[in-house]
Image (cartoon, helix red, strand yellow):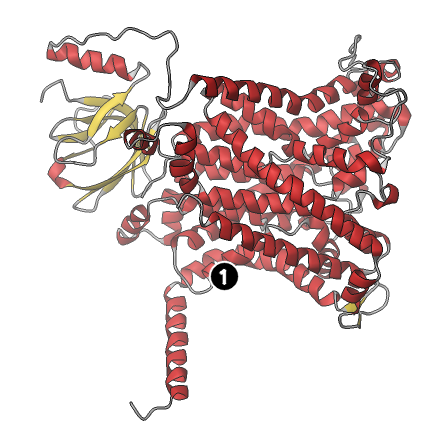
Amino acid sequence: MSELNTVKSAGTMKTISGKKYKGYLIATETGAAFYQKGNDKPLAEWTYPRLHRMDNIRRGGVSSQVTVILKDDSRYVFELDYGLKVYNHMDKYWVDKPVSPRTRGDELHRLAELRGEKIQVPKKHLITRRHPNRSIAGDIGIYLMLILVGAAMFFPLFFQIGASLKPLDEFFRFPPPIWPSHPTTDNFSDLFVTMGQSWVPFSRYLVNTVFITVAGTFGHLVIASMAAFVLAKFQFPGGKTFFAVVTTCLMFSGYVTGIPNYLIMSRLGMIDTYWALILPAFAAPIGLFLMKQFMEGLPTALIEAATIDGASTFGVFWHIVMPNVKPAWLTMIIFSVQSLWNNSAATVIYSEAKKTLVYALNQIQAGGIARTGQVAAAQVIIIAVPIIIFILSQSRILETMASSGIKD
Amino acid sequence: MQSQSFGSRYLTMRREKIQYGIQQAKRNKVCYLFLAPYAILFFTFFILPIATSIFYSFTYYNILEPARFIGFQNYINLILQDEVFLTAIKNTFVIAVITGPVGYILSFLFAWFINELPKWLRAVAVVIFYAPSIAANAYVVFSLIFQGDAYGWFNAILMEWGLIEAPKLWLLDPTYMMTILIIVILWMSMGTGFLSFVAGFQGIDRSMYEAGYVDGVRNRWQELYHITLPSMKPMLLFGAVMSITTAFNVSDVPRILCGYPSTDYAVRTVVTHLFDYGFSRFEMGYASAIATILFLVMILCKKAIAGLLGRVGT
């Protein structure tokens, strides 16, 4: 075994039964083996002639997931720290080289040094071009446009934050300042005083909203994903029609179905319970729609292989499909949280103690001109939460998305 | 066999087809099990209300008295007698035709531009563009910006520059209301579709671009048309559906910014009209007829766009 074509990457190995092992994968010209830390005997090893097929779920990026199926039908899922590039022609060796935290160029140099060759270092250009077929003028134009439009998009939000920090006298100054000259957090503290004096404590509204949001989102994720899975990966009578109906319902706004929905809920005795908000959220068409779109991109071979292996449909769904559609989960979670958080529940819930946060804030907004500052502060709170949730999960979405080139 | 009539052959075929369908359904029992929880909830909270809505559109129903069947009378009244409805249709049409396609194209273009940015900048840009639509009622701030007196920021700026002499009632004067409404809706148009585009761009396999470059794709526009668009068809259709939805369902923004009802019904939309009859006058039959018409128009729009998208990149 020459050092030249041996690559090593730390990561986890998952067997079909769902057991996870931490360790590292070593691949050579002739075969590959997975070792646990501090163990000399490999957990799994094979030579390439035994390899049936490989599915590279996510290519590039910071992590890489590779499913290896051997001819004897055993299969492993590797979740590796370094992106391993996979060759299609397996007769050579299947791992190209790890794209380590160092650059790929460094890796080439290391290999060349091992071979005793010398690589001529190309001169570094002042501006490095990521894409060869892009004009610089176009790039500059795009940046300018993004900055201008981005500033215009952000301005109203900036204005809103400014307004929430204005003392009352600055609301009536000419010309009105965008950003207050004496910013104060009085509006926020006043808001909490007003809220504290209300009949139902502020924390109660918060607990209600959080409960509804978490319960609704979780149920939606599980129920809609299950439906999306069979719709995307199985052919059965009625499936296509059902999905077409869901897609069409995507377009119906809440007002259009408002009254009949109320009548149905009152028949079911759900008025004035949390169920009136949570159950419809479970069936939100947008989540199913998105999930199905993403699942269609999963390699069918992956599912078929596991099914032949004897895994139950639920096993396939839970252990193979769900881990591979994380980007779609996050998107679903965001939409669900967004709609539940912003739900004022004014029509289906009457008890004050069961009302949501947005409803409580709307009550304050109805307070008139003396509360202009407090209204702005309330507004900032309502706006901030979904944006913060989005920012927190977006970094994960983008990371997962960056390597989600799903291919069959 | 020859002697068999066409009719009986057809019936045999039919029967075999149905039997095959039942067989398939039996084989895929587990699929229905997976689908059931969602399907039941979906039926209760989406299909049933829509069906009820269509049913009530043929009746006179004011919630207090039982519904009385009146045939197409609601529809006839809507089109022949209700002048406000015609205004609403006109306004909705103007809003939909402008904000729908423009918002759609802008979402796509900016998602595409953002995709060219380095990773960390891309994250910032996505938040900035997406924030107005994720934060549900962020648009309320426009009532401060376009406030009708001299303390309104827009008035003050124009007066400072000497463009106007006295403050204008931007949100109450029918001359400006529609323009401002369209600006606000465009501001909010980088919504779900936009997010889906951003995700779609990143999901495209890099090697396709490399291959395209070798095959002679010389600039970003060629790359867009020949590689990017065809691989993004599902996202494009999804974005279109979302655009139609927002464009036709505009109701909160005019209601909160311009008042309800708005001056001279200048920004009354079909959904505000529906809101008026359904939630204020409790003429449920009439409101249901409005809903049904709106729904039909949206379905037709979606069909047309799906047809158009089918031809992209070929």
Task: Give the vertical position of A215 relative to B163 (above or below).
Answer: below
Left/right placement of residue B28 relative to residue A385 reads: left
Q: Position of residue A187 (x, y in %)?
A: 81, 19
Q: Identify which residue is drawn at 58% across, 26% down.
A: B127
Left/right placement of residue A89 relative to residue B160 reads: left
Using the rendered image of the protein, determine whether residue B257 is visible from the camera's viewpoint: no
Q: Identify which residue is drawn at 79% across, 8% down.
A: A181
Q: Position of residue B269 (x, y in %)?
A: 76, 47
Q: Quadrant of residue A173?
A: top right
Q: Position of residue A36 (x, y in %)?
A: 24, 26
Q: Identify which residue is drawn at 11% across, 13% down.
A: A115
Report which residue position mark 1 lands on: A241
Q: Toward the viewer: A123 or A325?
A: A123
Left/right placement of residue A215 relative to residue A395 reads: right
Q: Toward the viewer: A50 or A311?
A: A50
Q: Identify which residue is drawn at 37% across, 90% down.
A: B5
Label 1's element?
helix
Q: Quadrant of residue B240?
A: top right
Task: Give the vertical position of A40 relative to B231 (above or below).
Answer: above
